[in-house]
Amino acid sequence: MERNLMKGNEALAEAAIRAGCKCFFGYPITPQTELAAYMAKRMHKAGGVFLQAESEIAAINMVLGAASTGVRAMTSSSSPGLSLKSEGISYIAGSDVPAVIINVQRGGPGLGGIQPSQADYWQATKALGHGDFHLLVFAPASVQEMVDMVVKAFDKADQYRMPAMILADGLLGQMMEPVSFPEINPDAHDKSSWAATGHKGQREHHIINSLYLKPDELEKSVKDRFARYDQIKENETDAELYLTEDCDILLCAFGATARVVKSAVNDARAQGIKAGLFRPKTLWPFPVKEINEAAKSAKKLLSVEMSMGQMIDDIKLAINCSKPVEFYGRTGGVIPTPAEVLAEIKKVGGAE
Amino acid sequence: MATTEILLAGFGGQGVLFAGKILAYCGLMDNKELSWLPSYGPEMRGGTANCSVCISDDPIGSPLVLNPDILIAMNQPSFDKFITEVKPGGKVFYDSTLIDAECSRTDVEIFPIPSSQLADDNSLKGGSNIILLGKLIKETNLFSLETMKKGIEKVVPPSKAQLIPNNFKAIEIGMNN
């Protein structure tokens, strides 16, 4: 397959177009702007719509509108922009329409900074908006995975009729790596039973709505959605296990941080320390089976994140607090180095 | 081959990212694993810009280069900032027209070349970055001249294809000085 060199942000955009995305609504923000710029250049040639909205809030509501008609729709932003989109994402979840949302994270809170961060983990996996709902959250660690996960996100969003997010960061968005595009046949999910495409007097109205004034009806709609979430937890978890078979210390990291950690794991192994890496590729659902498999021989776990430690609770719950979980992280846009992580491995008990 | 970590640094506008892109494409041409990571802060608008390039036979871990095997410095602040970070045994290429090198390190190989002056003398305005790449391929065995030419052809946009021969000339000047 032909290898191209692309920035992560551009690869996300090209993958979305190839996955059959027909509507992109965005608003510029560093460090994801190249994505929207690429869409502006290419979308109309691909027979779709690019629209720069007047705000993030407008953009996400345009996604809700477009997705309600059954077309593949997407928006992208970076951390502060995601907070603005949160109301619309809750409406999309409550309306059971599929959509893809991209977050190329930067440091926070508030306006924060523009350098890479993973401090939106809680937001993405726990509470991206009000109400009882989840979205699928994919965490790529390379430009190639950004392509593969966009394709998968559209597919799974359609399959389960729910929003799916790609949780990337400024480092992945800005870097260039070789990438190849697989032949993609956007799966023909039949949306004729719900999409608002005009009834032409031939069928019942399809109503896309998230308002249920009768508690019994609202409870039923939420419970139906949670039954789907149970299927997703069963079937859609994904993780990479690296040198975990005999590991004494299991490092846990996702996204760009996992690349740094992998280098540190290799360095630790070269020094005779049995380190391994568990890298969740889905953050919701969290790969519970996979981490328990990875942690079998480990005496300790060490979560490494570009945040103050937002994944630790999920790790502890997944392993039922059966082993100590330590933490090392940098935040505010600082990227941890392999040397720092190796020092931490030695400190928390990989050595001696 | 272990991973070769390269750091290119200079003022915004000197073509630091462009030169890095050429190296990245050279890696692509030679079927290597590679990564290219720019600084994207406010420094892009006039301050110091830098760019990390990793070339390897194996998948790249962290794309951020902190301790380069090869440093290409195009201005004094970049030279001063990064010279202490170069790995022992590493190689340093710099524009001696703009940089007064004061370096007490004896554990790195230093290759000065008056690339800005050479660019001006040969009517290659803005070609200092490419002259440094020419010097780089002469003093290392990272890429062949042929690969470098292919890399340039990939990076120069089609609308500016008439500039390709000038870039080839700049490479030659770098190799011969």
Image (cartoon, rainbow, N blue to C red):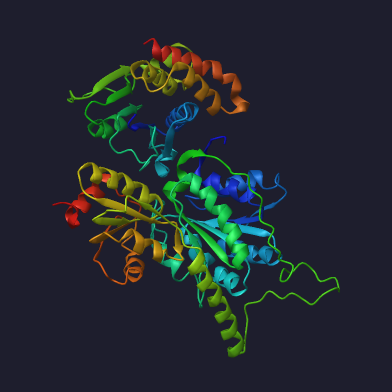
Query: Is residue A350 found left or right of B46 in the rendered image?
Result: left
- Residue at image position (26%, 50%) is A341
Quarter residue B77 falls in: top left
Q: Is A307 rendered above or below residue A232?
A: above
Residue nearer the viewer, A143 or A32: A143
Q: Is B97 rendered above or below residue B16?
A: above
Residue B118 visible in the snapshot: yes
Residue A175, position as x, y percentages in the image = 45, 42
Quarter residue B136 falls in: top left
Q: Residue furthest left?
A: A352
Residue A45, position as x, y percentages in the image = 71, 44
Residue A275, position as x, y percentages in the image = 26, 51
Q: Residue furthest top?
A: B176
Residue nearer the viewer, A180 or A275: A275
Quarter of the image with the N terminus of chain A is top right
- Residue at image position (58%, 28%) is B157
